[in-house]
Image (cartoon, helix red, strand yellow):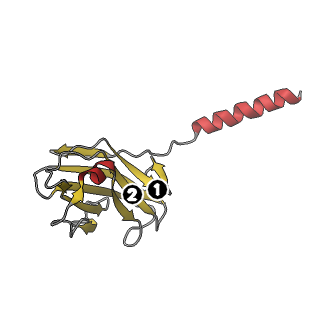
Amino acid sequence: MVSSKWFIFVLVFVFFYSCAPEKQKTNIVKTESGLTCDSVYLYYQNAEYNLVEFPMDSVVEMVFTGLNGFKLINGNNFIGGSLMVSDSTGDVIFKLDDVFLGLENEGVEKSLISKRVSMVLETGSPMKKGNIYTWENTIWDKKGNGKITAKTKIRLI
């Protein structure tokens, strides 16, 4: 009698769990033109993160690994990068034209760029809880013509 009650309980639990809505997963769209990268992913709370929902006042990274294709000058690459966030109507609410400003003259060692490059977004004002935003990062070669763009939707909870 007891074992059949447990069986029914487990069956009901599995049924309701399987009916729960699945959380939306990250869908990063990557466009390469002259530069390539092995992967792009979101990094949140010290781990790779594959969901699109973040609390307000979070720090989220978009990580590019295996960047390649930069023009090499004296062992260095000259990286540029922009970060842009737009709301659901397409209005830009935040934009940084070059997050690597100041690296035009000395550049960065190729080995560092090929390992990992992160673009950091802090979710907060003027962003609003419950809204969906498009987060777009572009990395380009300041001494060449290559660029790579990664774009994803995020929702603040």
Q: Position of residue 13 (x, y in %)?
A: 69, 36
Give me the C-alpha separation between circle 1 and circle 2.
7 Å
- 27 sits to left or right of 58: left
At 20% across and 44% down in the image, what residue appears?
32
Snapshot quadrant of residue 143: bottom left
Marks counted in the figure total 2
| Vertical comparison of 131 with 147: above or below | below
The amino acid pointed to by label 1 is Tyr
Residue appearing at x 71%, y 30% in the figure? 11
Residue 44's mark?
1
* Type of amino acid at the residue the image marks with label 2: Glu
Relative to 1, residue 36 above or below: below
Residue holding disc 2? 61
Q: Which mark is residue 149?
A: none
Residue depicted at 58% across the width and 37% down the height? 19
137 left or right, relative to 58: left
Residue depicted at 30% across the width and 44% down the height: 66
2 sits to left or right of 42: right
Dot placed on the residue nearer the N-terminal end, 1 or 2: 1
Would you say the residues marked 1 and 2 are in contact, meaning their CB atoms lie under 8 Å apart? yes
Helix, strand or loop at mark 1: strand
Tell which residue pokes out farthest to the front in this image: 74
